[in-house]
Image: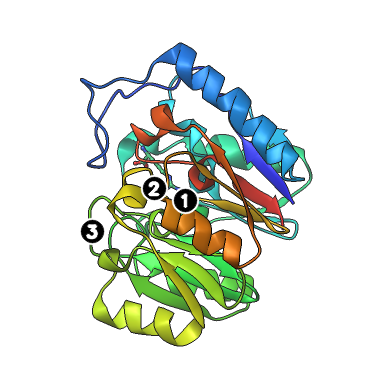
Amino acid sequence: MKVLLCPPTFFRIEYEINPWMNVANDADSETVLYEYALLKQTLKSAGIEIMEIQPDKNYPDMVYTANYGFVHDDVFIEANFKHSQRRGEEIIATSYFKSLGFQTKQFAKYIFFEGEGDLLRAGNQLYMGFGKRTMFEAKIELESILATSIIPLQLTDPYFYHLDTCFAPISESIAIINPSAFTDYALKILEQNFSTLLYTNEQDNAVLGCNIIVHNRNIVVSSGISESLKSGLKQLGYTVLETPMSQYIKGGGSVKCCCLIVEQ
Ligand code: ARG
């Protein structure tokens, strides 16, 4: 697996576009650099290859690379950010991917789509979160570019505004979810499609316990998740690698948000 990260050189809480963000509770620049170094180290120890994009001082949220777009083989599909504060990150990402020889695609800007934050793979199936950031209409655009069908899941909780904040597919049949973040219908679909679902509790939700990276049998997650989630994952044969994400959580993101998956 190969993931794209962005160093938190300019990471600050400069505006509030989700309920986790509070400009009065800014990120500590030294601590976030330390957390970034540990995140890289932990991902590497899980066998993951790291790529880095250069940060831009105008985009403090650039650290959440998952939102730049979606990568499929050698195609990069550009995001359409809902909030003006983040518009422009996708342009930087597009020129980065072009320089690496990727094909790039985009669709109409008024159809909001926040990249891998709202589009996740479980085996061969793609799931798209909508209703908070990404719009339902993105489904058809993405299905035509990717030539595959996508299952839409409606999100309901302002704290869990991207799919990767409340749903973590671990394999085709195993996932972690925060059930309170979905409509009843979306929850039914998840219960039907996954034979094993692990449910997060308040403690897991407070550190965005669904916001993980899975590679081989390793799971990289924020430190602070509950013993019950940890033991559930261990029983299924996974190794849980915890890394501190306190500063990133102030911005409303954790491990997965900081990783754009470039190669599975
Ligand atoms: N502050 C960022 C925003 O609100 C956090 C993005 C988190 N990313 C994610 N993939 N969940 O857009």
Secondary structure of the residue carrying tag 2 is loop
Quadrant in which the C terminus appears = bottom right
Q: What residue is shown at x 59% (from left), y 39% (from top)?
A: 93
Between the residue at mark 3 and the residue at mark 1, the CA separation in whole angstroms equals 15 Å
Q: What residue is shown at x 77% (from left), y 45% (from top)?
A: 47
Marks 1 & 2, CB-CB < 8 Å contact: yes
For label 2, the residue is: 208
Which of the 4 quarters of the picture holds residue 100? top right
Q: What kind of colouring is applied to the model shown?
A: rainbow
- Specify whether 58 is left or right of 124: left
Depth check: give the residue in front, 46 or 257: 46
- Specify whether 220 is left or right of 196: right
Crowding at mark 2 (Cα within 10 Å: few <14, some 14-19, many 20+): many
For label 3, the residue is: 157
Establish whether ligand 1 lies closer than 8 Å to the Cβ of label 1.
yes
Between the residue at mark 1 and the residue at mark 2, the CA separation in whole angstroms equals 6 Å
- Specify whether 121 is left or right of 49: left
Mark nearer the viewer, 2 or 3: 2
Establish whether ligand 1 lies closer than 8 Å to the Cβ of label 2.
yes
Crowding at mark 1 (Cα within 10 Å: few <14, some 14-19, many 20+): many
Residue 246 lies, with reference to residue 152, above or below; the image says above
Secondary structure of the residue carrying tag 1 is loop
Horizontal and vertical percent position of residue 261: 64, 51
Q: Residue furthest top?
A: 30
**Callout 1 amino acid:** Asn
Depth check: give the residue in front, 124 or 34: 34
For label 1, the residue is: 211
Between the residue at mark 2 and the residue at mark 3, the CA separation in whole angstroms equals 13 Å
Which of the 4 quarters of the picture holds residue 200? bottom left
